Structures are given as C-alpha cells and as structure tokens.
Amino acid sequence: MLTISTTRFGEIAIDEERVIYFPEGLLGFPEQKDYIIQQHKPDSPFYWLQSVTLPYLAFVIINPFLGEKNYLVELPPADQAYFNGIEDGRTLALALVTIKPDAVPPLTMNLVGPVIIDLETRTGKQVVLSTNRYTCKHPLILPS
C-alpha cells in the first residue's frame, strides 16, 4: 500500500498497482509521471487523474465516448492507431474536462489531446491528434 496526499481527497491509501506511469508526463507537466484515477463520487461519469507526488495537481476526466459517441469516426488512420485495444478493454481513452460555470457551454472536453492508458502495462500518454474535427474545448453534453 502507498499513502498519497491530495488536496481534494485528503490522505488516501492506494494499492501501488493503481499507479499509472506517464513516461513523458502530461502536456504542460512533463516532470509529473505518476498518477492514479480516483472516482469523483458514486454514479458520476467524472473521475480525477490525480498526481501521486503533487497533492494539488489533479485533472477532471471523462470517457470521451459519453459526450461524443462518434469520437473515432472519420479520424485519420494514424490517429485511430492510438485507440487500438479500446474494443477489448486493453486500452482506456480519457478526455480532460474544463468546468467554467459562467461560460457557454459550461463543460468542455479536450478531444484533440486525449489521455490513452494501456491497462496491461499501466502506462499512459497524452497524445495530440492531427484531426481538425475536434478542439480542446469540445462541448460536453452528457446524455440524460
């Protein structure tokens, strides 16, 4: 067991097998390599990508397919290759969420820079897709 400090959840004990290693870090945070995924609250579609080493560094994340059913449709083959393994559960794709209550729309997700996690090796990478179909501020509209 590993105990980590977080500003949102306090101190939490986690199984070391939950740690996801990002060899290149995330965009803007290349030095931060180790993260865990923490549930926001039961039955919520939102999760947190929480740094293991910096208590204040955490990103709201969501399965991009919840807000954009056709996410992989019309992506160039090079971009689709990042998502190999999604169908059989070996790969997880996540989108970083921005919440701005006073903005329209109040919720957006970054579909140009998804976070891809290989669940077998517990390694992750934030990729930048070459498509111009999506933006880093794609409206997030969850199904009712």
Image (cartoon, grey):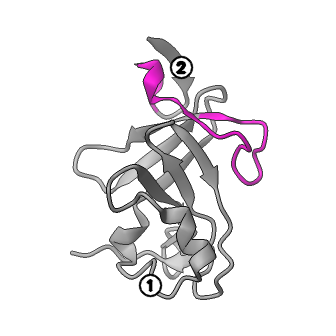
Which residue type carries mark 2?
Answer: Ile
The image's mark for residue 29 is none
**Taking the image as drawn, is residue 40 in sight?**
yes
Q: Residue at x 57, y 79 (%)?
A: 77
Q: Are marks 1 and 2 in contact (CB under 8 Å)?
A: no
State the residue in front, 10 or 97. Answer: 97
Above or below for 64 versus 30 = below
Quadrant where the N terminus sits is top left
Above or below for 86 versus 35 = below
Per the image, label 2 sits on a secondary structure element best described as strand
Above or below for 45 versus 67 = above
How far apart are the two marked residues, 1 and 2, measured between alpha carbons?
Answer: 39 Å
From the top left corner, tell me how far across and down residue 130 is, in percent.
Answer: 69, 78
Label 2 neighbour load within 10 Å: few <14, some 14-19, many 20+ = some
- Which residue does the numbered mark 2 point to in the structure image? 4
Per the image, label 1 sits on a secondary structure element best described as loop
State the residue in front, 27 or 137. Answer: 27
First to last magenta residue range = 9-34
**Would residue 11 be counted in the magenta stretch?**
yes
Mark 1 or mark 2: which comes first in sequence? 2
From the top left corner, tell me how far across and down residue 18 is, in percent.
Answer: 44, 29
**Would residue 87 be found to the left or right of residue 135 on screen?**
left
- Which residue does the numbered mark 1 point to in the structure image? 73
Q: Quadrant of residue 115?
A: bottom right
**Would residue 70 be found to the left or right of residue 78 on screen?**
left
